[in-house]
Image (cartoon, rainbow, N blue to C red):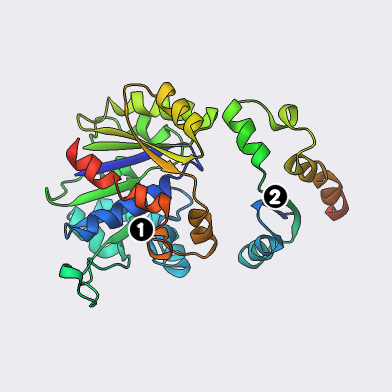
Amino acid sequence: MVVAIANKALDSGDAEQLARFSGLRVVGLVPRDPALAAAERAGVPLLDLSPASPAVEAVGSLLGALTKEAP
Amino acid sequence: MKIAVVGKGGAGKTTTAAVLARTLARTGQPVVALDCDTNPNLGLSLGVGMDATEALLSLRDGVGDGVEHARSWDDIVARFGVDAPGRRPPRHGLQDRGPRFRLPVMRGLPEQLLGLDIAEDTTVVADFEAGIGTLTRLGETKVDAVVVVTDPTVKSLEVASRAARLAEEHTAGPIVIVANRVLDEADRDTVERTLSGRTVLVIPEDDAIPAADRADTAPLDASPDSPAVRALTGLAPLLAGS
């Protein structure tokens, strides 16, 4: 199974563009998140700095999406 | 002149290399853009478009063969280069568009190609593969300048620090740090503190760059007056003047 995740996505248009270019099914969308920029600057895991940030929540929901896709 | 553009993946190397190559080409000097990445997209940032960039992808093996069989650097560029768009700015404020220039972009490995005999008046802007692997494989090959691209994140700065130290073994010329995505004074301070004593060119965070990437266009074409592109055009004079 090969699927795609749209990272740093601004909107659903980014996911559509990824699907069009890659030909893959896009099963998740991780939004561009200022909390990540802050964590990268601080050199600490995003999960520690901002556990409730949109990017963390989106990545957390990937497992469910992948499980659903798995044959 | 051979210019190596190095840094961590995602730091903005390709955008920096593309704006540098086209800025230099506008002065009328011969410039060749060399995409050293296994996953090449320098063509997109130069404005050659998706199809031509994809075509470059299939040339990797061809360039390898070309090194064995071709007679010269010029021969390789003629066989494998794809022209990037662009014109020299018109003189005296004329409305006419300036004359076209040639800016071939091609793929290849710097350790194979940069050791070849390249004409003195030609500038090669080589967009190295992410990380510092290529620098460690350059062996005795020397370049005339190294541009180390970073953003103000801890990981990117760490790679930049190592790259700048390694660069000293491969160039007697300038080593310039390009600090991309600088949001504020704190970012600027972080970069300058981490790489103290180096020449640093600060590029502000600018939504025009991801917007150009999303539209498959060269930032220099899509948003020539945006803050990041304007700042990046300052790199060529900095390299020449160092």
**Which of the numbered marks, if any, corresponds to residue B100?**
none
Relative to A56, say whether B19 is above or below: below
* Front label number (1 vs 2): 2
Q: Position of residue B120 (x, y in %)?
A: 11, 48
Q: Quadrant of residue B222?
A: bottom left
Residue B80 visible to an observer of this rendering: yes
Instruction: Give, as a three-letter code, the residue at label 2.
Output: Pro
Q: Nearer the viewer, residue B98 or A28?
A: B98
Parent chain of label 1? B
Across and down, in percent, residue B159 comes to 46, 29
Residue position for label 2: A31
Report the front residue among B147 and B62: B147
Residue B70 seen: no
Crowding at mark 1 (Cα within 10 Å: few <14, some 14-19, many 20+): some
Q: Amino acid at mark 1?
A: Gly
**Quadrant in which the N terminus of chain B is drawn:** top left
Residue A10: which quarter of the image? Answer: bottom right
Front residue of this view, candidates A3 and B196: B196
